Image: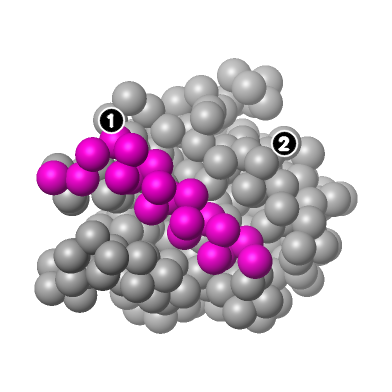
Amino acid sequence: MHEMKTKINCLIFDFDGVIADTDLARFYILRDILKEYGIDLSNRFSMKDLNGLSTEAYLKKNYENLSSSQIEGIVRKKHHLHFTNLEQYVIPFPGIQETLEYFHNRFDLVMVSANPYKNLQILLNHLGIKKYFKWIFGREVCENTDLEKTYSPIASKIQREVSECIVIEDSEYGVKAARKAGYYCLRFDPNNRFDPGLENDKAKTHSELKKKIEKYTTN
């Protein structure tokens, strides 16, 4: 475990898998849509393949036979189903409201997600937590040309040093992106989905996450 060398003044949160449990809903929606294209998602699907990627990125990486227009149609239909059923498909993790409320007066809070910015606004407003975040960045900022998440632009966008921030991620893609950019990264893994990876430490609940952030940021 690495000791924190610099005073932390910023916490950076991912959305899917950290703020809310959306993975299973996303799978079920995609599974049903892809049946219309003759694709059985369950035959080759791994939850880890989808975690940390936008739907467009996942489809482009895994289904080369789909045309750009088909992918656009799938994404459009997926977003429609998702955003007209938010109560069913976006389940906030226990304690997330308390975590954000507890830390937002002590730190600048940042949202960095593979969701498009306009969709991210809807999700945060739906959960009533948009007010806690000083900065909100969607895939327009944090998705690179390989359609993978990147944290490289974030420090300059928020005018902070990387060493002043902690990133909270869940997926392999997200943790890898945070560590590649030099951030200290806590992995949130309530369902023990991930083997130990590049994260500096991990937590299973938001209560545990709060305690670890407190420990690392108390002088």
Residue 85 vs residue 218, the one in the foreground: 85
Badge 2 crowding class, 10 Å Cα cut-off, few under 14, some 14 to 19, many 20 or more, is some
Q: Residue at x 23, y 39 (%)?
A: 67
Q: Residue 73: in sight, yes or no?
A: yes
Q: Please, what secondary structure does the residue beneath circle 2 have?
A: strand
Residue 41: image quadrant is bottom left
**Marks 2 & 1, CB-CB < 8 Å contact:** no
Query: What amino acid type is highlighted by mark number 1?
Result: Asp
Residue 61 vs residue 30, the one in the foreground: 30
User: Which percent across, then down, holds residue 115?
Assistant: 53, 46
Magenta residues? 65-84
Query: What amino acid type is highlighted by mark number 2?
Result: Trp
Q: Is residue 22 above or below residue 197?
A: below
Badge 1 crowding class, 10 Å Cα cut-off, few under 14, some 14 to 19, many 20 or more, is few
The residue identified by callout 2 is 135
The residue identified by callout 1 is 146
> Which mark is nearer the camera, 2 or 1?
1
Side of 43 where 101 appears, left or right: right
